[in-house]
Image (cartoon, rainbow, N blue to C red):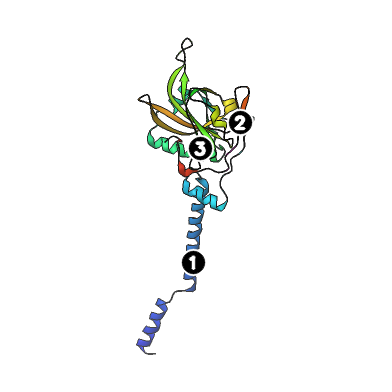
């Protein structure tokens, strides 16, 4: 056989790809696609507090369902007074606060699967403002109360304002419930029966001084009593709006 023909035949053998090469390449691409899809699913379902992820879950009909706890079966958590809350949260820098806020909202959406993050608010709080919640708020329907902590310096003096402010969210369909709270009223908040859980922390200026602001929401549902005669019902929200962000009072 002439040398030039052997050389041509040899060149053709080098250029051709064996069948198993394309099979291997297809499997690698399929594996990469599966890993990426798996990572995206974990991110979406594992971080429902992110607005984009929540919207995806909403379209899929898989948004987290809030459990209807009662005072008898709420998760265990720390109960802190205003001074204890101030000591725990006020010293956090912005980066740690942002990270904690993300975890707090996620834990709320997941029905407090991590009890270490669950903190209940206690103490006396004087109402500063009351407003009904709108569809653009984090929770709807309902209303929110902004109140300042009142603390006694000692057993022999009257309570004075303390640099801790709470936004107390009441998820309810009762449109008249907000009118039962007036500016100047003092709310006594206890773990039992209120179960008001911390969901967001921030800092504000009160009387020209920096103060701690906490957004809290009750997780024990049913009748909420005001005094001995008045009450209204609070129920877990069926849908949230993470895109609105917290706090309620911007």
- The residue drawn where x is 40% and y is 77% is 15
Looking at the rendered image, the quarter that the N terminus falls into is bottom left
Characterize the magenta stretch by its predominant secondary structure.
Answer: loop
Where is residue 114, by image quadrant? top right
Q: CA distance from mark 3 to mark 1?
A: 53 Å
Residue 146 horizontal/vertical position (percent): 47, 29
Say what secondary structure mark 2 lies in.
strand
Residue 97 horizontal/vertical position (percent): 42, 35
- The residue drawn where x is 43% and y is 38% is 99
Instruction: State the mark number for residue 26.
Output: 1
Q: CA distance from mark 1 to mark 2?
A: 62 Å
Say what secondary structure mark 3 lies in.
loop
Provide the residue designation for mark 3. Answer: 133
* Residue at the far bottom in the pictured view: 1
Indicate whether 71 appears above or below 137: above
Range of residues picked out in magenta: 233-240
Provide the residue designation for mark 2. Answer: 232
Q: Report if the CB atoms under discs 2 and 3 are less than 8 Å apart.
A: no
């Amino acid at each position: 056989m002439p040398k030039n023909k052997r050389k041509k035949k040899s060149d053709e053998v080098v250029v051709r790809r064996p069948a198993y090469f394309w099979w291997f390449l297809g499997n690698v691409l399929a594996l990469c696609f599966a890993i990426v899809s798996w990572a995206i699913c974990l991110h979406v379902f594992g971080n429902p507090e992110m607005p984009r992820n929540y919207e995806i879950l909403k379209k899929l009909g898989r948004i987290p369902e809030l459990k209807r706890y009662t005072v008898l079966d709420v998760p265990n958590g720390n109960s802190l007074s205003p001074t204890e809350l101030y000591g725990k949260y006020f010293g956090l820098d912005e980066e740690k606060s942002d990270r904690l806020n993300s975890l707090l909202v996620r834990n709320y959406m997941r029905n407090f699967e991590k009890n270490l993050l669950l903190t209940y608010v206690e103490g006396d709080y004087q109402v500063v403002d009351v407003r009904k919640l709108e569809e653009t708020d984090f929770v709807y329907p309902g209303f929110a109360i902004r109140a300042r902590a009142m603390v006694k310096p000692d057993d022999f003096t009257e309570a004075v304002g303390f640099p801790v402010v709470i936004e107390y969210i009441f998820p309810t369909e009762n449109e008249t419930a907000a009118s039962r709270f007036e500016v100047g009223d003092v709310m006594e908040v206890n773990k039992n029966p209120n179960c008001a859980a911390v969901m967001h922390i921030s800092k504000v200026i009160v009387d020209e001084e920096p103060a701690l602001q906490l957004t809290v929401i009750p997780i024990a549902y049913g009748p909420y009593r005001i005094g001995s005669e008045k009450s209204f019902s609070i129920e877990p929200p069926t849908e949230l709006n993470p895109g609105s962000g917290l706090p309620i009072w911007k």
